[in-house]
Amino acid sequence: MIDFDRDTAFNQKILGVLDARTKASIHNVANQNVPGFKRYRVEFEDMLRAAEERGGSIESVQPATKRDNSGPPDQNNVVLMEELAILGKTSLLHDVMTRRIGSYFGTINKAINGR
């Protein structure tokens, strides 16, 4: 049997992470020509995997937006093609998750209405 409350919470959490990742990438693209700007990145998957190995719940895992300080201190480390790839991947994952949620609620609707 599927635990719908947990599944819905998972979908909501993933959509929140995708939103944070999109905002970070857009911010990075907007600052790609600013000297010394260091890009932001959103960490989540590794923390989720670690929580799962510990037996923790997904509710306890929060995405973390961190500064990527790689490269020389006075040099911008934003690579436009990498940011666009992140935005493309995020868009695809967002589409998958919204279709998954739509399917779930469509099934609930059919069960309630009987059609």
Image (cartoon, rainbow, N blue to C red):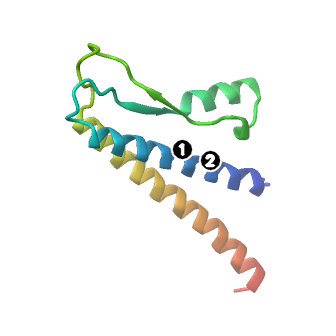
| 104 on left or right of 54 | left
Q: Residue at x 66, y 35 (%)?
A: 61
| 70 on left or right of 2 | left
Q: Quadrant of residue 55?
A: top right
Q: Secondary structure at mark 1?
A: helix
Q: Quadrant of the C terminus?
A: bottom right
**Real-space Cα distance between discs 1 and 2?**
6 Å
Q: Residue at x 29, y 28 (%)?
A: 37
The kind of residue tagged 2 is Lys
Name the residue tied to disc 2.
13
Q: Residue at x 63, y 36 (%)?
A: 62
Q: Which mark is residue 65?
A: none
Name the residue tied to disc 1.
17
Can you give x and y, in whole percent of width and height, for residue 63 in the image?
A: 57, 36
Can you give x and y, in whole percent of width and height, for residue 12 in the image?
A: 63, 53
- Residue 11's place in the image compared with 29, above or below, is below
Q: How dense is the environment of label 2, judged by Cα within 10 Å: few (below 14), some, or many (20 and up)? A: some
Residue 82 in view, yes or no:
yes
Q: Secondary structure at mark 2?
A: helix
Can you give x and y, in whole percent of width and height, for residue 38 in the image?
A: 33, 26
Q: Residue at x 70, y 78 (%)?
A: 109
| 15 on left or right of 73 | right
Can you give x and y, in whole percent of width and height, for residue 77 in the image?
A: 27, 25
Residue 2 in view, yes or no:
no
